[in-house]
Image (cartoon, rainbow, N blue to C red):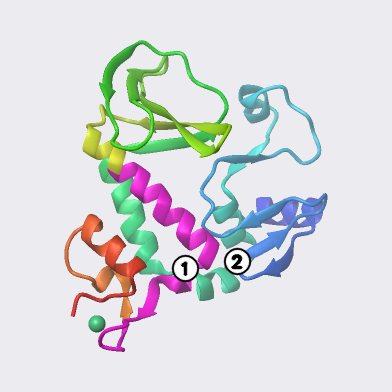
Amino acid sequence: MEDIKQKIVDFYEPKLFGKGVAKLRGGRFIQLGNKRKVYLTFGKHYKDEKEAIEGGAYRTTPHDLFVLLFPEEAEKLVDKRTEKYLEKLNKTLGLVDYKAGYEEEDVDVEQVYTQFIGGDIEVGKTNDGKWLAQYSKRTDVDDYVVVRMYFSRFPSQKDVETAKLLKEIEHHFMLYGYDAAKFNCWECGKERHWLDIPGGLREKWPAYLEKYCGC
Ligand SMILES: [Zn+2]
């Protein structure tokens, strides 16, 4: 691990840029909380993932990279409790990857879930045996993204909904920092952690957004 760290430091000259953000040489930013899969190629160009892996590119996520490069800073910012909770939730769901972009993946649709808001969710099996749940989401009057969620097992509609919520939570902490996990309840004034709020995820999260501890 020290070898790769040194190699990254030498090549990318990472510098802290703000709370939970660092900048790499060449202008790329890495952010704590961003769990998207990325490759560090050390200046080489590869035509696809396979070639990158064979060529010795380093597979990581911006989050893991930040933790590797700035462990003390990460220690201060990461909320261990939230991190563990979200990791466990990811595992329980069998959510292995998440992509958002313009591309749709071509799979035989085996199940369609209708959403109250947004387009239908199509579920099908990918060539490498994962389960894909995809749907398009309007982001603007004339723009949209295709969300693709990959599961290690067949996802129920509830699983897909939970995965969506999970991504929303990750995004929230990416924007506001993991120290935002603690808040002062507007009702009792006490400082609480969002995971102290009673109930499951669907109770905790809306209450947290309203800064209400459930007292
Ligand atoms: Zn309270």
Of marks 1 and 2, which one's residue comes earlier in the chain? Answer: 2
**Residue at image coords 72%, 56%:** 6
User: Looking at the image, do the residues carrying marks 1 and 2 touch, with CB atoms under 8 Å apart?
Assistant: yes
| Farthest bottom residue in view | 189
Residue under label 2: 20
Magenta segment main secondary structure: helix
Amino acid of disc 2:
Gly
Is residue 199 a member of the stretch shown in magenta? no
Quarter of the rendering containing residue 193: bottom left
Give the x, y percent position of residue 197: 23, 71
Give the x, y percent position of residue 92: 25, 44
Q: Is residue 110 left or right of residue 73?
A: left
Helix, strand or loop at label 1? It is helix
Quarter of the rendering containing residue 155: top left
**Residue at image coords 75%, 60%:** 14
Disc ID at residue 178: 1
Q: Which residues are magenta?
A: 162-191
Amino acid of disc 1:
Tyr
Give the x, y percent position of residue 183: 38, 78
Disc 2 Cβ-to-ligand 1 distance below 8 Å: no
Quarter of the rendering containing residue 153: top left
Q: Which residue occupies the foreground of this view, 169 or 93?
A: 169
Q: Is residue 207 above or below residue 130?
A: below
Image quarter for ligand 1 equals bottom left
Q: Which residue occupies the foreground of this view, 141 or 156?
A: 141
